[in-house]
Image (tube, coloured by chain):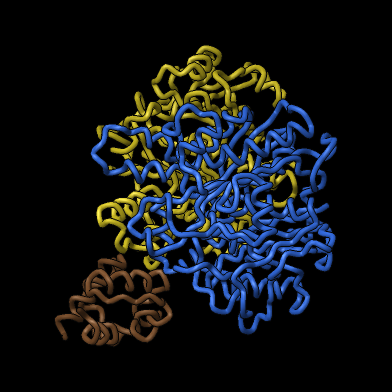
Chain colours: A yellow, B blue, C brown
Amino acid sequence: MDIYIKSSDSISAQLSFESGLPSTHETTEEAFYNCIKPEYKKYISPKLLRRMSPIIRNGVACSLSVLNKANLEQPDAIIVGTALGCLRDTTSFLTQLIEENEELPNPTYFIQSTHNTIAGQIALLLTCHSYNFTFSQMHNSFETALLDAQMLMLDEKANNVLVGGVDEMSENTFNLIKDLDCYKNTKPGEGAGFFILSSEESPVKLEGVKIINEPAIDFEKELQQFGLTPEDVDVVIGGDNFADDKAYTDANNLFGNISYVWYKPFMGEFGTVSAIALWMATKVIEEKEIPDCWIKNGVKPDGIANVLVINSVGNEHSLMLLKAK
Amino acid sequence: MSKGIVVTGFGVICSIGTNADECLDSLLNKRSGIDRIKYLKTVHKDSFKLGEVKMSNQELADQLGLPSSDLHSRTTLLAMVAAKEAITMAKHLNGVKDKTGVVSSTTVGGMDVTENKYLKETTDYSYLYTHSCGDSTKKVAEYIDATTYYTTLNTACSSGTNALIHGARLLKHGILDRVVVGGVDALTMFTLNGFNSLKILDTDYCKPFDAARKGLNLAEGAGYVVLERESEATKSFCKVSGFANANDAHHQTASSPDGKGAYLSMTEALEMSELKTEDIDYINVHGTGTDNNDFSEGTALNRVFGKGNVPSFSSTKSYTGHTLAGAAGIESVFSVLAIVNNVMYPNLNFKTPIEDLDLVPLTEVVKDKEVKNVLSNSFGFGGNNSTVIFSE
Amino acid sequence: MSELKEELKAKLIEQLNLEDFEVSDIDDNDPLFDDEGLALDSIDALEIIVLLEKEYGIKLDDPKKGKDIMQSVQTLADFIEKNRK
């Protein structure tokens, strides 16, 4: 079975929601990237919205948008990746607990602190009884969710899968995580990227996803598994977090002559930013062009067939490959 | 698609034992691990009973041969103990495999470290590294040398079975040759107060499936099984014959009165296994002891098997307490042990059946029957319902 | 009594994030858990139990008993008057 991206959307620090790859982007003066908030009420009733923390709002709104775009009422599976989950509610519950010496913390925070609140809320909203998974593996949270979706479809257990990645950032969270290595050179961020994967043919084909836990990426070896050589790649969507990261240095050298798009400096660094990168790759193929501001090396693409997304933090990397049908 | 996946190792640590042998001995001698609070720091020390693992972090680190317990959360230490037992068994049985990985699950990750350091006037920010759910899995994968692929499920209390489902797929698609699957959670102030705020903790010993049940006993532990492709495993303990995950889509935390999600996960797992309902010898129910879960699960059992035809069943949470993401992994190990040893475990503290359900769990150990097929249920918040079937 | 009811309304709005409500929108006898009224759910019920204990020192361990007490702001206020410490 071939797997296609039937619809996609993202909520990010740039004007991405319900739109294409924007023709301009802004860097933030703040300590971290906040995402641009959509009009949530378009998708979520006030009754439900009142309790939802930002990560749930973004996950749900982005999911409902891609379902709308795909004209799909019910997916055959809901699979979400989140690196740190519902951190705001977790922090609220924990703070209350400690400050008030374990006296009567509010249950709502606890209920909504579970990582699978997002996927669970989507199921509840759609009354969707199908397969419902949530993955949380730091910088590979979205990638392992995507791999699960791909395997589920290949096993013919699903034809339309809702899959996405989402994480949130707040002042509190920022104060907690700012000293982590991965934010040394790139500002933290937040956002959501969701997709409908479908067995039905459409312009963007998901060739594969590969998770690599090694000191470096052997690009030639990895591309070979997809029957490609580095020369076959037309566009690279590289994270490039300004850090001295071996995988990115290698990628910049190897792919210096083709269009090299970067995303982390404008979207921020967070566990599931690769979901936004995959959304960018999808748009590049759908729109057959890339606004200049996103191209790091100034090389315009000469035809777009194979787009490679690279995500790397420390010794954990991933590759995602899309093909124009 | 599960055809051809076998169990080649298992490991467990929980309140009734620090390895599979100890746990089996407790199960067969009706020895519960639920007790007054001894290790967890909390103001509720005298109010609740917990299923604690009776070892300090340093004792766990010593057993693992780690220089100090400071580098790891209790979650990670518990996971390491069970995963090591499991992989050692698999290596002993079928040798070393190239592509080995870990699919674990946890609901609160390194929260035990976080809550002890968070908000304290300290310059020690090491908890930042151990907080995320993925951290413990990564550490376990490195500890047992299984880093080809690792990831973590967090679907609340059904997580461990979902880890098994993802792991089985990784084998089928050739991404791994051997995978350690299951789950872990350490006891934390966070979860104790969380479940207390939901008013679903019993202050006494939990009474799963009893009419007078009042709630669950929170607990900690880890359980893992090792899966391999049958075609390449020369020896194995049993097969994974079916599994499924479905969503109740009823409420954020509560189960539906008609047990829709549980009904779906059980029927879909049975369908995959190609077994008939009467082929199931024993069911290890989710059976938390809460009013809501046991009624909903009981209703689903009657719907799937027919009233009066529900196979022998019990909730081993009456021994271990509810270990959250650890539960499905631990109960997978108990299910495998039931098949290997032809035993079925009793449900402790049961007296009176729930009105309208007419379901009576096993109250004594059964040793004289063949146990060929065991079905194990695990349900979680977010309407997340999972079932796995192990077969001889 | 009327002071207590106004106070309760404000606390409910704050604690349950009833963003679209003002104190003046809630009548004393509006049903709390009905779509005709505030359309609260079981999670809100748990929050109200916490509110009763925190603000008025009234412990309600069995959520099931809350049903009669939590019919409206009026029944809640009556209960608090009778039981507050």
The answer to whether residue C68 of the structure is visible from this angle is yes
Q: Quadrant of residue A208?
A: top right
Percent x, y for residue A111? Answer: 43, 60
Task: State the quadrant of the N terminus of chain C.
Answer: bottom left
Residue in the foreground of this view, choosing between B39 and A242: B39
How many discs mark residues in the rendered view?
0
Residue at position x 31%, y 35% from top?
Answer: A32
Residue C37 sits above or below residue B123 on the image: below
The answer to whether residue B385 of the structure is visible from this angle is no
Q: Quadrant of residue C17?
A: bottom left
Report whether A10 appears left or right of B143: left
Residue at position x 63%, y 79% from top?
Answer: B353
Q: Farthest residue toward the left?
A: C3
Residue at position x 79%, y 53% from top?
Answer: B341
Percent x, y for residue A18? Answer: 45, 47
Report whether A188 appears left or right of B351: left
Report whether A65 appears left or right of A231: left
Percent x, y for residue B31? Answer: 61, 59
Residue at position x 31%, y 43% from top?
Answer: B118
Residue B309 sits above or below residue B372 on the image: below
Residue B173 sits above or below residue C83 on the image: above
Residue in the foreground of this view, choosing between A303 and A38: A38
Task: State the quadrant of the C terminus of chain C.
Answer: bottom left
Percent x, y for residue B381? Answer: 52, 60
